[in-house]
Image: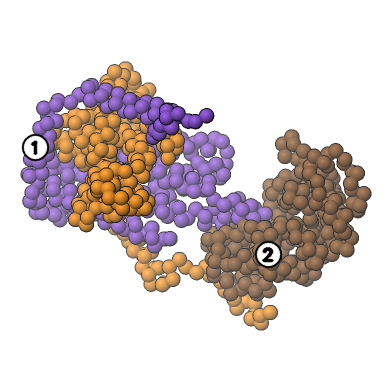
Amino acid sequence: MKPTVADRAWSRYTSRQRWTRLAITATVVLAVSWSLSTIDIIWPWVWDAPAQIGDLFSRMVPPDFSSLDKIVWALIETLNIATIATFIAVVVSLPIAYIAAQNTTPNRATLWLGRFILVSSRSVNTLIWALLFVAIFGPGVLAGIIAIMFRSLGFLGKLIGEAIEEIDQRPVEALEATGASHAKVVLYAIVPQVIPTFFAVSVLRWDINLRESTVLGLVGAGGIGVILQGAINTLDWRTVATVLIAIIVLVIAGEAIAAWLRKKAI
Amino acid sequence: MSTATPSSRHWRKPPFITNPLLRWGILIGCVVYAVWALYTLPFDWARIQEGMSRAQRIFSGAFPPSFERSELLIEGLLESFKIAILATLLGLALSVPIAFMAARNIAAKPIYLLGRGLIITARSFHPVIVAILFVKAVGFGPIAGVLTLTIYSIGFVAKMLAERIEEIDWGQVEALRSSGTRYVAVLQFAVLPQIMPRQIGLAMYQLDSNLRASAVVGIVGAGGIGATLMNAFGRYDYAFALAITLVIIAVILVVEAISGRIRRNIW
Amino acid sequence: MLRITHLIKRYGNGEPVLKDLNLEVPDESLVSIIGASGAGKSTLLRCINRLVEPTSGSIELNGQELTTLKRDELRKSRRRIGMIFQGFNLVDRLTVMENVQCGRLGYIPYWRAALRRYPAEDIERAFHLMERVGIAKYANKRADELSGGERQRVGVVRALMQNPEILLADEPTASLDPVSSRQIMELLQNLADELKLPVLINIHNVAEAKEFTRRIVGMRFGRLIFDGKPSDLDDDAMDAVYSGTPSDEREDTGAAFTRAVTQ
């Protein structure tokens, strides 16, 4: 039988694909129109927004460098918060990673304990942690350090734990066969295999923490954010501009150092 | 067999950094830095000592979490969803042209630098900083949230997309060019199809992270569940604050699971 | 002297992997164990140092029963059993010296292991053994920088560092090129003579087994069906060891094994 024209008609998608695409498009359209129609927005404000934003920027130039020394000190404080918090978090996350990895955890209960710690640390944002610790310890750098540390634990513990789960088991078997105790097997067969990931993940988290430390001050937990908040509250927009430039410099420098450290280690 | 006397041989693990001066320099430098950093940080010890009793008060106030004003909670949560959806859509749309600008193999040099500059600026600022500026410019509420997260999305999506464009299969582009196709049509038929799958995956990922971020930018007044949380905290209503936090965690976990599943199926 | 009697190993409720296995290996003898994949050779070796737990039966090493040992006693006994692996199982990111000293981990205190402050006599012994097998010049190299043959020598030295009373080698040459493979077999042969150890080698390469060992044990589906001198391993015996599938074996148990020589 010769194929009819209809059989030969070419189309980009099969009918099933077409229905899936239609369904996805419909979902997107529905979600967007629901959001747009119910969101609590005063539309004249929206149309006015570009002008307002432009006005804000125009008030930022030229940046005011008169309090630069204070800003530089705040930058150093920010750096110190991020570094100290990362260091503590790295140390504390090791035992958590150890009990949260399936192949090293002593038993079921510790596995779930480890996972619980990781999930609760990861699901709460640094700034929410900071709110809590500012309420406890008062405004200041300690609240910031502890907040950054708490958030980092989950990140570090999860990634290091996964690295422990992915190690080559054969050296472990070999060392068990020599009659080495469990602690020594960990030291010689697991630790060396996890060290590269450990290092890379710590540097990565330090980089992230540097960014997060710049905003701690907005809830009172120390760092450059305190100055930013102060300048915004006093409508000192030209100082705000300086602080923003300072933050960009800090973050880009941090990224460059992190990239360099990673390259060095490999 | 060697004739060396048995006790004459030593072995030390070769150090990680061979140069002893550098090795000790780095070690001492780290210690000095740590001591100096801890010494210069302004700890308010008197206030910190009250911490334990305050913690006790906060936690006894927080338990059990109170869901009494759950309509406020749901309202805030829905607003966060709306902010995240709109910002994701806007961000994805805007990041396509910016990604083309920032792809070295497609854009001319000055345009490339402009595109990269936009991306770097968007990425350098924590969304909370962007949010506080928008709140000042356009007032409290979800507009500031949408604008903030749009910029946040551009920073990530445009970067990933530009990297994807830079590694596309160039043969397809040349095939179209050699048949005399116009530049815009080349982009549409040779480049876009190659980056679309990535774009859909990124969309899911970005929706997920925008939802997380919308919980935070609310803290500085950009609407959503974060604003609800901040209000509860400001009124020392710790039981409600805990309830909100628990709901945020639950929603984040659920959305993460869903978006993870969808991305696995698409990618 | 290693004596295995009535050894059975079964995973879950399946067909046993080792079925009532009996074997005796006197000191100073090199025994190769041949057999098709899945015959249970690897499981047999791992039952001896209990990397795999035997289901029942008895394994005695120089008069000590191994199957009933508790944790700490087991650890102490494992120190006396050296093992060499097909994949070398070295820790790639550690130096050759550290890998070699792994063989002493069961003997030294934890702080020495952690700080790499090995006892002087262990270092001396390591250099001595590494010179013996020709890898002393690599002491400070990372294990993953070595070639396959060199890596297996590190594996052999690690096992010898334990001062073992028996050596178990699980396909020690299967990942090596023919030249390195011969060198490792010669090394094992010489070590068995020099150190007066029983050495058990699982091996796929029957030609090597015939050339380097004076006693060959053939396994098939969890049973010993051949045990004799290389010259006794003729074509019929080879067929008995290497032919068939597990289902054949269940149908005619015993019928094809007339040539099996058990002790």
Q: Nearer the viewer, mark 2 or mark 1?
A: 1
Q: Which residue is mark 2?
A: C156
User: Can residue A28 be seen?
Assistant: yes
Where is residue A66? Give x, y as percent: 9, 54
Write the residue at 74% across / 34% down: C13
Q: Is residue A61 left or right of residue C92?
A: left
Q: How many dots with numbers?
A: 2
Question: Which of the 4 image quarters holds residue B6?
Answer: bottom right
User: Residue C163's mark?
Assistant: none
Foreground residue among C59 and B112? B112
What letter labels the chain drawn in brown? C
Work out which quarter of the rendered image holds the C terminus of chain B and state it.
top left
What letter labels the chain drawn in purple? A
Q: Is residue B260 above or below residue A72?
A: above
What letter labels the chain drawn in orange? B
Write the residue at 90% across / 51% down: C260
Name the kind of residue labelled 2 in the image.
Answer: Val
Q: Secondary structure at mark 1?
A: helix
Name the kind of residue labelled 1 in the image.
Answer: Ala
